[in-house]
Image (spheres, rainbow, N blue to C red):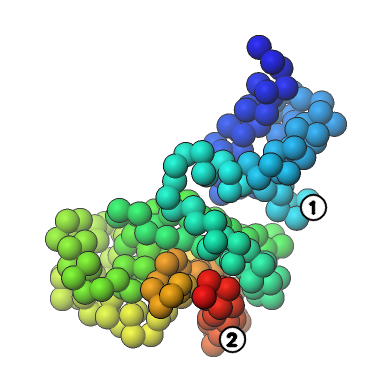
C-alpha cells in the first residue's frame, strides 16, 4: 500500500467524522499519530485540490467542495457556495456569530457551508436536521409554493415532539408558514438549549435556493440590537442574490 495515500484518506475520514467542527492541524496529527510537518504537507495538498478547506489560519480544517462532489451530493451547489463564501465571512466578522447556508433535501435541512465566529461560547447545530426543527428548515419550507407545502405535510405530517412545540394542528402550521413567507424571516427559540435561530431566503433567478441563518445563545440575542442583526442578515443574503443573477 502507498503510505501517503493512506494518510490522506485517514485525514479525510477523520475530518468527515464531525464535519461541523473545524479540526486543527495539531488535533488531526495527534489523532492519527502523524508528524506535524507531514500532516501539514498532506493537508496543504488536499486544500489546494479542494478536498479540504482551511478556516482561517488557526480555526482548523473542514471538508471542501471536491469531497462533497465525490458523494454525488446534489445539495452542494458550486455557484451558490462561490457566491456565498465572501459575504458570509464578512457577516460573521460583522456580527461575530456563526452563520450557515442550507438547502432542503427530502424532509431535512442540509447545511452546505458554515462560517465560524471568535466567541468563546458558540452555538453548534447539526449539518442535517428535520425541517421543522430549525429556523432554516422552516424558512425553506415556507418559501415553497403552496402545493409543494401541502404535499410535504401530506407526506411527512405535522411536527412531533419538541421539533416545533407551538404547532398542534395543520391550521396552526399553515398559519405559521404563511407568516414566515410574508416576512421572509424565520425565528426559532430553542428553550432547552437557550438558543435563537434566525433565517432569511437566498434567491437565484427569482427562486429560493437556500437559507442564510445565524444561531446564537439567547443571552447574547437579548442584549443586542435585534433589528440591526436582521438587517445584517438580509444584507448578506442580498449580496449573495446579486452574485447569483
> Which mark is nearer the camera, 1 or 2?
1
Q: Nearer the viewer, residue 179 or 240?
A: 240
Outermost residue, right direction?
37
Q: Is residue 4 visible?
A: yes
For this view, does 185 lie left or right of residue 69? left
- Percent of width and height locating residue 79: 54, 61
Image point (45%, 68%), residue name: 211
- Percent of width and height locating residue 189: 42, 70
Numbered circle sitting on residue 163:
none
Reply above or below: 72 against 98.
Answer: above
The residue labelled by disc 1 is 57
Q: Earlier in the sequence, mark 1 or mark 2?
A: 1
Image point (35%, 54%), residue name: 105
The answer for how far apart the CA atoms under marks 1 and 2 are is 29 Å
- Percent of width and height locating residue 56: 75, 55
For this view, does 76 lie left or right of residue 168? right
- Badge 2 crowding class, 10 Å Cα cut-off, few under 14, some 14 to 19, many 20 or more, is few
Q: Nearer the viewer, residue 86 or 10?
A: 86
For this view, does 38 lie left or right of residue 100? right
Image point (65%, 21%), residue name: 6
The residue labelled by disc 2 is 228
Under circle 1, the secondary element is loop
- Percent of width and height locating residue 188: 41, 71
Q: Are marks 1 and 2 in contact (CB under 8 Å)?
A: no
For this view, does 38 lie left or right of residue 146? right
Q: Tell me the quarter of the picture where residue 233 sits.
A: bottom right
Amino acid at each position: 500500500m502507498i503510505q501517503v495515500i493512506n494518510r490522506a484518506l485517514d485525514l479525510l475520514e477523520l475530518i468527515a467524522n464531525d464535519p461541523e467542527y473545524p479540526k486543527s492541524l495539531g488535533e488531526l496529527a495527534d489523532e492519527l499519530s502523524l508528524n506535524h510537518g507531514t500532516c501539514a504537507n498532506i493537508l496543504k495538498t488536499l486544500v489546494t485540490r479542494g478536498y479540504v478547506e482551511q478556516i482561517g489560519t488557526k480555526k482548523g480544517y473542514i471538508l471542501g467542495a471536491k469531497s462533497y462532489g465525490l458523494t454525488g451530493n446534489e445539495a452542494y451547489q458550486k455557484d451558490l457556495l462561490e457566491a456565498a463564501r465572501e459575504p458570509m465571512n464578512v457577516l460573521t466578522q460583522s456580527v461575530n456569530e456563526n452563520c450557515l447556508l442550507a438547502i432542503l433535501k427530502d424532509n431535512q435541512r442540509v447545511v452546505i457551508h458554515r462560517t465560524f465566529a471568535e466567541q468563546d461560547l458558540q452555538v453548534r447545530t447539526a449539518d442535517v436536521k428535520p425541517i421543522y426543527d430549525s429556523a432554516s428548515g422552516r424558512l425553506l419550507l415556507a418559501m415553497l409554493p403552496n402545493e409543494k407545502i401541502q404535499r410535504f405535510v401530506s407526506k411527512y405530517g405535522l411536527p412531533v415532539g419538541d421539533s416545533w412545540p407551538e404547532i398542534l394542528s395543520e391550521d396552526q402550521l399553515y398559519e405559521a408558514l404563511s407568516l414566515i413567507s410574508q416576512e421572509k424571516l424565520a425565528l426559532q427559540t430553542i428553550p432547552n438549549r437557550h438558543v435563537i435561530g434566525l433565517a432569511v431566503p437566498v434567491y437565484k433567478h427569482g427562486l429560493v435556493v437556500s437559507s442564510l441563518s445565524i444561531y446564537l445563545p439567547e443571552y447574547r440575542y437579548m442584549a443586542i440590537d435585534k433589528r440591526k442583526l436582521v438587517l445584517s442578515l438580509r444584507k448578506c443574503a442580498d449580496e449573495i442574490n446579486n452574485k447569483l443573477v
